[in-house]
Image (cartoon, helix red, strand yellow):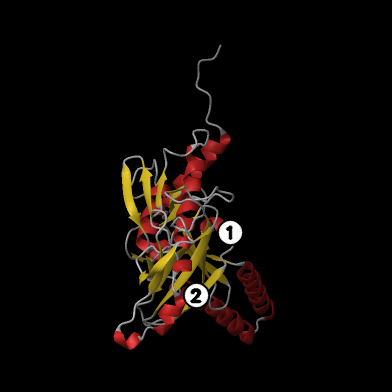
């Protein structure tokens, strides 16, 4: 019985060979922080189908000029070859020394399309035209950009988001065939960018877990016991605003918002507690429900707190509090580090 180790599976061997070829031949790199310059070694160029057809035509012209000893035929042949060489040089220069930098990336919910902002800086005196770029996984590039001499432009590239947590930007490929389309030049870039993916909110979540209210999500019990008008306090429901009194206030005198006040009942306490959710729900289902409740509480202007393991966020409202809660839900169980 043979004791020699089994050879590596073809798929694994092919993947390794592609990885080695990519790192050595195509200069594929890991995360590239900051601004990146596309040096000449990072720009690759090959003839296109049109370029191959043009080369065949030039060859036929050269053969015809030799057979019939045509001086004008030689002139046309060498002129056409010179045009092709100039086109090859201009195509490569359209990408060479272009500077790339990542921009902002707004958080999204799982399942939504994540968008990465990428900046192209052209600090040379040469205008750059028809630069196609997109993520490598997208296949054929879908976005085109022109960058004038000494100018910059921004491009939004999109990709689908999967699970919650940090989503790193995929590898970017830049392609150009400018000016004649006889050659195709391309380069790769791995931007150091990532986007935070929030958990997808539950579609049919139960009502908010309000405490201290006799009924409804109004924020106070005993809505029929009207007690008067008072100054607006952060967190008062929008439907409690006293619009008639607000309309009478003179903004020039520093008029403020006013709310209706009810005596009966106590203020509603809204704490979103991970451990208080039903035990039959798994971790992802709990996070999805808490995400929905965070959005609902913000929509109803109800101050809410969040208890998630050791994290204790006190009740509050606003974009900053919403972002802090959603970030905690997105990174629950994840190690906070740069990818």
Residue 44 position, x and y percent, is 47, 63
State the SS at label 2.
strand
Residue appearing at x 34%, y 54% in the figure: 315
Does 279 sit left or right of 263 as displayed?
A: right
Considering depth in this image, is 1 or 53 the residue closer to the camera?
1
Residue 17 position, x and y percent, is 49, 43
Residue 283 position, x and y percent, is 47, 38
Q: Quick check: can you spot residue 208?
A: yes
To which residue does mark 2 refer?
145
Residue 142 to residue 202: above or below: below
To which residue does mark 1 refer?
139
Q: Quadrant of the N terminus?
A: top right
Does 297 sit left or right of 160 as displayed?
A: left
Badge count: 2
Q: Which mark sits nearer the N-terminus, 1 or 2?
A: 1
Residue appearing at x 55%, y 47% in the figure: 206
């Amino acid at each position: 019985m043979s004791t020699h180790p089994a050879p590596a599976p073809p798929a694994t061997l092919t993947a390794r060979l592609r990885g080695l070829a990519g790192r050595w031949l195509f200069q594929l790199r890991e995360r590239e922080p900051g601004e990146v310059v596309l040096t000449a070694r990072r720009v690759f160029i090959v003839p296109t189908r049109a370029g191959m057809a043009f080369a065949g035509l030039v060859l036929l012209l050269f053969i015809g000029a030799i057979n019939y000893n045509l001086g004008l035929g030689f002139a046309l042949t060498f002129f056409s070859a010179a045009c092709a060489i100039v086109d090859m040089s201009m195509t490569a220069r359209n990408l060479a020394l272009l500077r790339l930098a990542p921009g902002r990336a707004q958080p999204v919910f799982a399942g939504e399309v994540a968008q990465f902002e990428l900046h192209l800086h052209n600090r040379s005196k040469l205008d750059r035209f028809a630069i196609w770029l997109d993520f490598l996984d997208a296949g054929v590039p879908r976005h085109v950009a022109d960058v004038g001499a000494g100018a910059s432009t921004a491009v939004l590239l999109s990709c689908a988001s999967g699970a919650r947590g940090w989503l790193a930007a995929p590898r970017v490929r830049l392609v150009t065939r400018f000016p004649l389309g006889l050659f195709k030049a391309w380069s790769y870039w791995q931007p150091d960018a990532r986007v935070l993916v929030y958990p997808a909110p539950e579609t049919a979540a139960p009502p908010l877990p309000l405490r201290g209210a006799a009924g409804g999500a109004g924020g106070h019990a005993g809505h029929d016991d009207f007690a008067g008008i008072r100054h607006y306090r952060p967190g008062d429901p929008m439907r409690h605003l006293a619009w008639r009194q607000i309309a009478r206030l003179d903004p020039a005198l520093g008029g403020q918002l006013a709310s209706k006040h009810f005596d009966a009942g106590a203020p509603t306490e809204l704490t979103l507690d991970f451990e208080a959710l039903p035990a039959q729900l798994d971790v992802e289902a709990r996070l999805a429900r808490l995400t929905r409740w965070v959005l609902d509480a913000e929509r109803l202007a109800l101050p809410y707190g969040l208890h998630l393991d050791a994290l204790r966020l006190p009740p509050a409202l606003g974009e900053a509090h919403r972002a802090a809660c959603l970030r905690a839900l997105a990174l629950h169980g994840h190690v906070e580090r740069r990818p």
